[in-house]
Image (cartoon, rainbow, N blue to C red):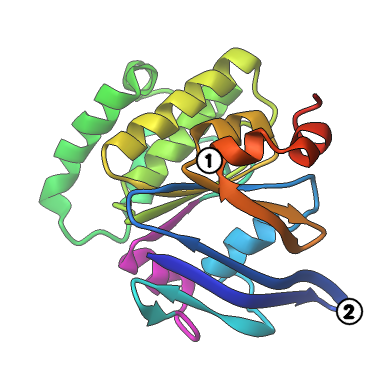
Amino acid sequence: MLELSGIDVHYAKNHVLKRVTLAVNEREIVSLVGANAAGKTTTLRTIMGLKAPTAGTIMFEGTPLANVPTDARVHRGLVLVPEGRQIFPRFTVTENLLMGAYHRRDRNDIAGDFDALFGMFPRLAERRRQAAGSMSGGEQQMLAIARGLIAQPKCLLLDEPTLGLAPIIVQEIGDIIRKLARGGMTILLAEQNAAMALGVADRAYVLETGRVSLEGTGAALAGDEAVRRNYLGT
């Protein structure tokens, strides 16, 4: 569904991504694991057209994305849940979700999708009229994911969804990701918490200073000695 081939990205003179090549198949969870500043967020921003590559190609469903603006990529089914949640704190839960559906033309179907999302995220249903900024960090992350889902993604990009959350909430976010995958969602997960990311992944890539250093199944990388030493603390 999604393929990056030889992607280079620069910020001024800083070479941030170096010949990054990866693929995400339909109905697959692929995790992108690495330390802070390894290039995970830049990879997702480049896929969304928020940062232009200086070399390489990005293909989505067999079509190159060069010169395709971000809003058109969203229409095609690429949706990013950004790092730091970036919800609208003064808007209610419902208003935040409506922002996620802003581009949709099937306005009559949105109410049914709200019901499905509130069934998946019952705490959001309880707080649908509450200002999003007054909720806990875990609830805000659930809102950010739900806002991404209301946009009807074919491929959902999740950027550090467990950042700063308590372990019990990290586990809950992992369960949500697995549930989405069982429902057929294709997911590219960029995550510093390697244990969670590899635990949910069908396949995974390790990014080190902008390069893919390892790739394999989630289980294989979780058992790799270097990964265990550098990312799992064992």
Tag 1: residue type? Answer: Ile
Which residues lie in the magenta part? Answer: 65-80
Residue at 44% across / 24% down in the picture? 175
The label number, if any, that marks residue 13 in the structure image? 2
User: How many marks are shown on the rendered structure?
Assistant: 2
x and y percentages locating residue 165 in the rendered image: 65, 23
Residue at 35% across / 39% down in the picture? 181
**Dot 1, how many residues are within 10 Å of its Cα: few (below 14), some (14-19), or many (20+)?**
many
Residue 146: quarter of image: top left
User: Along the horizontal axis of the image, is 74 left or right of 192?
Assistant: left
x and y percentages locating residue 118 in the rendered image: 28, 26
On the question of residue 91 being in view, the answer is no
Could you say which is closer to the camera, residue 167 or residue 140? 167
Task: Name the residue carrying label 1.
Answer: 87
Looking at the image, residue 124 lies above or below residue 75: above
Residue 220: quarter of image: top right
